[in-house]
Image: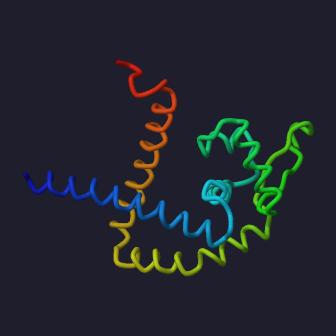
Amino acid sequence: MSNRGETLKRIMDESQRHYAAYVLFNQALADHLRIHSTDLQCVALLDLESGPVSTGEIARLTGLTPGSATRLVDRLERAGLVERRPDPADRRRALVALAPSARERISAAWERPGQAFAEVLDRYDDAELDVIADYLHRAAEVGRAQADRLTGESGPSAGS
C-alpha cells in the first residue's frame, strides 16, 4: 500500500475511533448533566446558532421529525434549558433560545473537557489548525448529506 493509501486508511480508522469516543463522551456528559444525550446535542447546536430558531429548524438541525422536535423542545423547556420566545416577524409562532442558566450549566460541565481538547489542539501550528478545521467542516457536511440520503431511503433494499 502506498504511503498515501496507508495515511488515508489511518484517517478513516481514526475517524471511526474519534466518532465512537465522542459518542461515549457525549453520553457521559449528558449523564453528568442528568439530561438525555439528544437533549445535550440540541443544546450544543442551539449554542452555535446566532439567535433563536424555530422548532422546524431544530428538527432540521437534529434530524428529528417535527413532532419529535416539538417533544424535545417541551422536555428542554421543562428542564429549564430553553425558552420559547415570540417570533418578532410572526407573533403566532414561537422561537426557541437557550436559557441563560443553561449556557452557564453547560459551560461549567464543559470546562475540564474543553481544556483537554484545547491541549490537543495546542500541538498544531496555525496552518495545521486551518487544515483540521477545514476537514471537520467538510466531513460534517458529508455526514449531514449522507444522513439525509439514508433517511430518504425506505430501507436496506431501497434503490436495488
Q: Residue at x 37, y 54 (%)?
A: 135
Asked if 154 appears above or below 104 in the picture, the reply is: above
Q: Nearer the viewer, residue 51 or 114?
A: 114
**Image location (x, y in percent) of residue 71:** 76, 45
Q: Residue at x 70, y 41 (%)?
A: 68
**Image location (x, y in percent) of residue 53:** 74, 47
**Image location (x, y in percent) of residue 94:** 85, 43
Q: In this view, does 17 lie to the left or right of 152?
A: left
**Image location (x, y in percent) of residue 80:** 81, 63
Q: Is residue 135 left or right of residue 78?
A: left
Q: In this view, does 145 lie to the left or right of 88?
A: left
Q: Which of 73 and 58 is in front in this view?
A: 73
Identify the colour scheme used: rainbow
Q: Is residue 89 left or right of residue 158?
A: right
Question: Among all residues in the image, which is located at the extreme top?
Answer: 160
Question: Among all residues in the image, which is located at the extreme right?
Answer: 91
Q: Which quadrant of the view contains residue 103?
A: bottom right
Q: Residue at x 42, y 59 (%)?
A: 133
Asked if 90 appears above or below 8 in the picture, the reply is: above
For the C terminus, the image quarter is top left
Q: How many marks?
A: 0
Q: Residue at x 65, y 54 (%)?
A: 42
